[in-house]
Amino acid sequence: MEYPVSIRNGKKDSHVVRPNYRGLGSVSWRDISADSIAELVRLCASNSAAVMFGATSDGGALSLCILMDRDKIKEYPRTQTEIDSFLLWLSTEYFSPPLSTKK
């Protein structure tokens, strides 16, 4: 099977586009509580950081990328518990305001 090759300026580019034939996993952002996602956005916005949400190409994990100044933090959580642990770390170790406690 031949894959398409990108050509720029008459030269072959090193970037080759290949189809993804892997099956999708079962992890979805729908599995994560809206409160956790809102808290993540609140933490990032209040600290002038950007957050990118995604999923791995095989669907086995979610992907988070936090961008602040020159820092780039990537995390690949698979469960609500892993998201909560990452939020706690972000709020206590990386960002200055503490994580709000909800009851």
Image (spheres, rainbow, N blue to C red):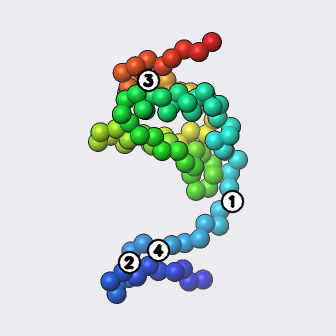
Q: Position of residue 69 (x, y in %)?
A: 29, 39
Q: Residues within 10 Å of mark 1 (few under 14, many from 20)?
A: few
Report the residue marked by disc 4: 16
In the structure shown, which secondary structural element does the residue marked by tag 1 occupy? Answer: loop
Q: Nearer the viewer, mark 1 or mark 2?
A: 2
Q: Residues within 10 Å of mark 4 (few under 14, many from 20)?
A: few
Residue 24 found in image quarter? bottom right
- The disc, 4 or 1, on the residue closer to the chain's N-terminal end is 4
In the structure shown, which secondary structural element does the residue marked by tag 3 occupy? Answer: helix
Q: Nearer the viewer, mark 3 or mark 1?
A: 3
Q: Position of residue 58 (x, y in %)?
A: 61, 55
Query: Quick one: which residue is furthest to the top in this view?
Result: 103
Total marks placed? 4
Q: Quadrant of the N terminus?
A: bottom right
- The disc, 3 or 1, on the residue closer to the chain's N-terminal end is 1
Type of the residue with mark 1: Gly
Q: Position of residue 87 (x, y in %)?
A: 50, 28
Query: Quick one: which residue is furthest to the bottom in this view?
Result: 10
The reply to whether callout 2 and callout 3 are in contact (CB within 8 Å) is no
Residue 41 seen = yes
Report the residue marked by disc 3: 91
Viewer-nearest residue: 97 or 20: 97
Report the residue marked by disc 1: 23
What whole-number distance in Å separates the C-alpha atoms at marks 4 and 1?
21 Å
